[in-house]
Image: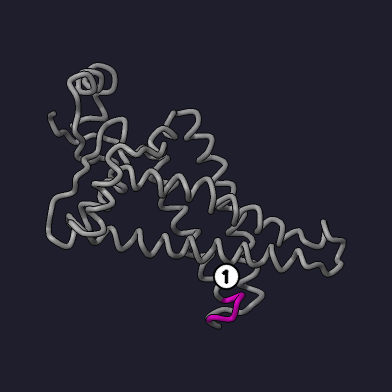
Amino acid sequence: MPVRSVKIFSGFERFWHWTQMAIIFMLLFTGLRIHGVHELISFDQAVELHTWGAIALMLLWVFAIFWHLTTGAWRHYLPTMNGLWPVARYYAWDIFKGKPHPYRKHFWRKHNPLQAMTYAALKLMLFPAIWVSGLAYLFYNYWQGGISSPWLYWVANIHVFSAYAILSFVIIHVYMLTTGDSFRHHVTPMITGYDEVELTDAELAYLEQDEPDRIK
């Protein structure tokens, strides 16, 4: 199949990705301050920034969910076992032997099976967990009437566990950008929107006929 430069990341998708990244880093920074890990800003400043950052992130997620559903982009995140084990073996073993990546992006499947499974778990499990626990924490006095309750312990721990899980994902995600091809090769598509993609004859014909601006 021919490999062409195709715009697979839309303007909104890139905006959503980089804005989400900036807000998550800010939330991690302020969250660590709230827990006393550092004292680079005051506690009150950290709480205020953390609250407004969380609200901004949730609004961004609402728009992102709407965009995924209306554009059909959610299909890229559907988990599949097809090709999963070669990709898992590549990251666990073959990558250290200099072997090529077993997966190439396709027009209708831009994430490899391991990426799709990871992103699906992130969006369907971790994000809702930190979202619900954060709101429960923020409005604790309203649903508990200001009375101390053991539920606060569980809400707080679910929120912290979810935050550290997301931090682990961020670290692994950045590490993966340094593997295989150059760092620039991995990051450029999320800046320009274009990446090298294998196209079937039908996909190439569709792009040339209906969306010529997406192909170089």
* 182 or 163: nearer the viewer: 163
Tell me if mark 1 has few (under 14), some (14-19) or many (20+) residues whose alpha carbon lies within 10 angstroms of its own.
many
Q: Is residue 185 above or below residue 168?
A: above
Quarter of the image where one finds residue 46: bottom right
Magenta segment boundaries in residue numbering: 33-37
Report the side of 57 relative to 209 (left or right).
right
Who's the residue at 22% across and 58% down the image?
Answer: 183
Examine the structure image and report whether residue 210 is included in the region drawn in magenta: no
The tally of labels here is: 1
Left or right for 151, reference 216? right
* Residue 41: x %, y % from top left: 56, 78
Q: Position of residue 154 (x, y in %)?
A: 69, 64
- x%, y% of residue 20? 47, 53
Give the main secondary structure of the magenta stretch. loop
Residue placed at 31% from the left, 34% from the top? 109
Of all residues shown, which one is farthest toward the bottom? 39
The residue identified by callout 1 is 31
- Quadrant of the drawing holding the N terminus: top left
**Magenta includes 34?**
yes
* Front-lying residue, 44 or 142: 142
| For residue 181, side relative to residue 9 (left or right) | left
Q: How is the image coloured?
A: one colour
Quarter occupied by the C terminus: top left
- Please, what secondary structure does the residue beneath circle 1 have? helix
At label 1, the amino acid type is Gly
Q: Is residue 199 above or below residue 57?
A: above
The answer to which image quadrant residue 49 occupies is: bottom right
Q: Viewed as shown, does residue 6 lie left or right of 42?
A: left
Instruction: Please tell me which residue lies in front, 85 or 171.
Output: 85
Give the residue at x 13% y 60%.
97
